[in-house]
């Protein structure tokens, strides 16, 4: 009797979702396979939603479609109630984006970069100097620069900034038009631990103060675990979606390995008593941790091996993302258990 | 109104970048002087053209600089893409046409600054210039810059990177120096070269400036190829076609990868 793989969790759209993605497919010109292959999820207002996956999983492609820089090949994507393909301008007004690679003009000062952005978003008219800009704009720049700790540097050329300061400047720029949704595409790439921590502290403040919806792509599990919900993508497909606890429950399967000198008798007993098992060597029983004692008490055949396996979420995640892609149309790869174990020889 | 301010911001950024790039400033001012003084003299065989050859070359280099600088400036579209700055522009709630017009406007202003420098240089070497001529050439210079920008846009929209741009642009520009008659008279070319010359956009930019400069002068018939109105019509029609096609290709390339 074989243990059945855990099926992927389907998307369950919420009525008031601020982002709705249904069956999104993106295939780049000339590519042999889809970069994003039927992804569906939704994001509620004010939610912190994380797209987690390895490099090349399709996270940045997904976020590029959501932010209107790429057209989808097929599927439906609504952001703030607007279709990304048909009403891109409305989507852009509602969104702020921090890109994976810095998108600042190093020839300009920090303030000039922000001013450029503010004018493009219609917040202020174009003026050649900061002094000529409207008072509201100047106050907002000073306020955000103060909060981000770059007040002194805001009129300095960006080329003199450290990586952490550039990231802070990008945050300042992305928030200047008070977006409803903030997309963060691997925002901590290249940052040292101190800058990374300070960035997350500030983003948490932004979220709590402004109720901003945040969509994060990352390949760092510890960053995704801060989110309200996680969507794990690999090979362009969703393999798990839900709260961190739910995803962990999906991905991490505790199991028990047992073996006996008389293995045939053990197999017969397990089959007779309706206990599902797999494997030909040590037999695997997919047993929740709480049931281990009950299962062992129920087995009468003398055992000479008992191992309990309790993989970490990271182990399970690595197992998922390192598996090869399923062939087209075969659906997403099924989650499998993996990883660390504790052992007790009987 | 937002779109106008956005285009102005995009143009202003390109002008700021130019003004802060000393090497580019020196390069863009030195090359026209080299063209007028050294190449102009080299092509002057001492033959009696019936007009002042130095003035002929000066006007050619002025038209060529305005056209070429605007066209080459569109490389900044590719630079922005490669530096990832363009992604910040593409997610802004403005039209792609605004982005393109801002770019052409910015690089056109940079080209006009270069043109002003060449005019100052012309006065220094005693090229005869008067105010009516200068006033007539100013709107023509703006039209030439837009024309050059539209030409550059169409080329850039079809190129993958800066390396390709640096390889393709000399191939497209250098033959036009001669087909447009920047240094050399082209009134009596053979049939094949005449067709090639007619297909060279730079020719209409150079001939427009010469037509305005020599208007009412006895040398006009020897120097100018087409009436001013004809040159303007070609620049308007072809420039608009290049702009529309270039923008459509640019937008499609950026969004429909």
Image: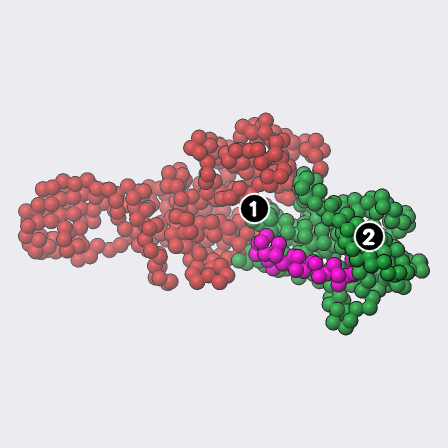
Chain colours: A red, B green
- Identify the subunit bearing mark 1: B
- Identify the subunit bearing mark 2: B
Residue B152 appears in view: yes
Residue shown at 75% from the left, 61% from the top: B178
Q: Quadrant of residue A237?
A: bottom left
| Residue A263 relative to residue A179: left or right | left
> Is residue B162 covered in magenta?
yes
Residue situated in front as seen by the camera: A131 or A8: A131
Q: Quadrant of residue B168?
A: bottom right
Q: Residue furthest front?
A: B46
Quick one: quadrant of the C terminus of chain A?
A: top left
> Secondary structure under badge 1?
loop
Quick one: quadrant of the N terminus of chain A?
A: bottom left
For the stretch drawn in magenta, the main secondary structure is helix
Q: Position of residue B55 (x, y in %)?
A: 85, 53
Residue shown at 39% from the left, 54% from the top: A235
The magenta region covers: B158-182
Relative to B220, is B77 above or below? above
> Is residue A83 covered in magenta?
no
Residue situated in front as seen by the camera: A34 or A162: A162
| Residue B31 relative to residue A118: left or right | right
Q: Which residue is mark 1?
A: B83
């Amino acid at each position: 009797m074989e243990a059945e793989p855990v099926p992927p969790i389907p998307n369950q759209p919420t009525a008031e979702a601020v982002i709705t993605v249904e069956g999104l497919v993106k295939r780049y010109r000339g590519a042999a396979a889809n970069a994003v292959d039927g992804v569906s999820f939704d994001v509620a207002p004010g939610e912190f939603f994380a797209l987690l996956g390895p490099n090349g999983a399709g996270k940045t492609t997904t976020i590029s479609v959501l932010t209107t820089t790429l057209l989808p090949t097929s599927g439906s994507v609504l952001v703030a109630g607007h279709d990304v393909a048909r009403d891109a301008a409305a989507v852009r007004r509602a969104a702020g984006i921090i890109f994976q690679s810095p998108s600042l003009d190093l020839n300009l000062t920090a303030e000039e970069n922000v001013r450029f952005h503010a004018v493009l978003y219609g917040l202020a008219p174009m003026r050649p100097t900061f002094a000529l800009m409207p008072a509201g704009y100047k106050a907002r720049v000073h306020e955000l620069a103060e909060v981000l700790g770059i007040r002194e540097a805001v009129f300095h050329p960006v080329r003199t900034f450290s990586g952490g300061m550039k990231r802070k400047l990008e945050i300042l720029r992305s928030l200047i038009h008070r977006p409803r949704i903030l997309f963060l595409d691997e925002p901590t790439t290249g940052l040292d631990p101190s800058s990374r921590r300070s960035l997350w502290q500030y983003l948490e403040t932004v979220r709590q103060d402004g109720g901003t919806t945040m969509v994060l792509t990352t390949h760092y599990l510890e960053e995704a675990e801060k989110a309200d919900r996680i969507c794990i993508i690999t090979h362009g497909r969703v393999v798990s979606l839900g709260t961190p606890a739910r995803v962990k429950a999906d991905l991490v399967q505790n199991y028990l390995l047992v073996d006996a000198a008389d293995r045939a008798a053990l197999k017969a007993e397990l089959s007779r008593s309706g206990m599902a098992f797999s494997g030909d060597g040590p037999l695997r029983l997919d047993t929740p941790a709480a049931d281990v004692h009950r299962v062992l008490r129920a087995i009468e055949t003398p055992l000479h091996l008992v191992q309990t396996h309790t993989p970490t979420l990271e182990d399970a995640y690595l197992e998922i993302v390192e598996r090869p892609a399923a062939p087209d149309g075969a659906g997403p790869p099924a989650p499998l258990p993996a990883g660390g174990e504790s052992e007790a020889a009987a | 109104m937002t779109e106008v301010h956005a285009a102005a911001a995009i143009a202003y950024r390109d002008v700021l970048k130019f003004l802060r790039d000393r090497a580019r400033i020196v390069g863009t001012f030195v090359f026209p002087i080299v063209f007028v003084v050294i190449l102009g003299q080299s092509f002057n065989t001492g033959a009696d053209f019936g007009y002042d050859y130095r003035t002929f070359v000066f006007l050619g280099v002025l038209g060529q600089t305005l056209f070429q600088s605007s066209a080459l400036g569109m490389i900044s579209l590719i630079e922005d893409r490669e530096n990832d700055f363009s992604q910040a522009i593409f997610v802004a709630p403005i039209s792609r046409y605004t982005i393109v017009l801002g770019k052409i406007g910015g690089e056109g202003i940079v080209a006009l600054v270069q043109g002003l420098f060449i005019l100052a240089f012309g006065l220094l070497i005693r090229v005869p210039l008067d105010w009516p001529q200068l006033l007539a050439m100013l709107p023509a210079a703006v039209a030439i810059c837009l024309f050059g920008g539209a030409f550059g846009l169409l080329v850039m929209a079809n190129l993958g990177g800066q390396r390709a741009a640096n390889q393709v642009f000399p191939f497209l520009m250098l033959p036009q120096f001669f087909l447009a008659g920047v240094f050399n008279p082209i009134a009596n070319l053979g049939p094949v070269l005449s067709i090639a010359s007619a297909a060279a956009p730079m020719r209409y930019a150079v001939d427009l400036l010469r037509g305005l400069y020599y208007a009412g002068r006895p040398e006009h018939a020897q120097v100018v190829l087409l009436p001013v109105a004809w040159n303007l019509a070609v620049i308007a029609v072809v420039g608009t076609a290049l702009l529309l096609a270039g923008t459509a290709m640019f937008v499609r390339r950026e969004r429909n990868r």
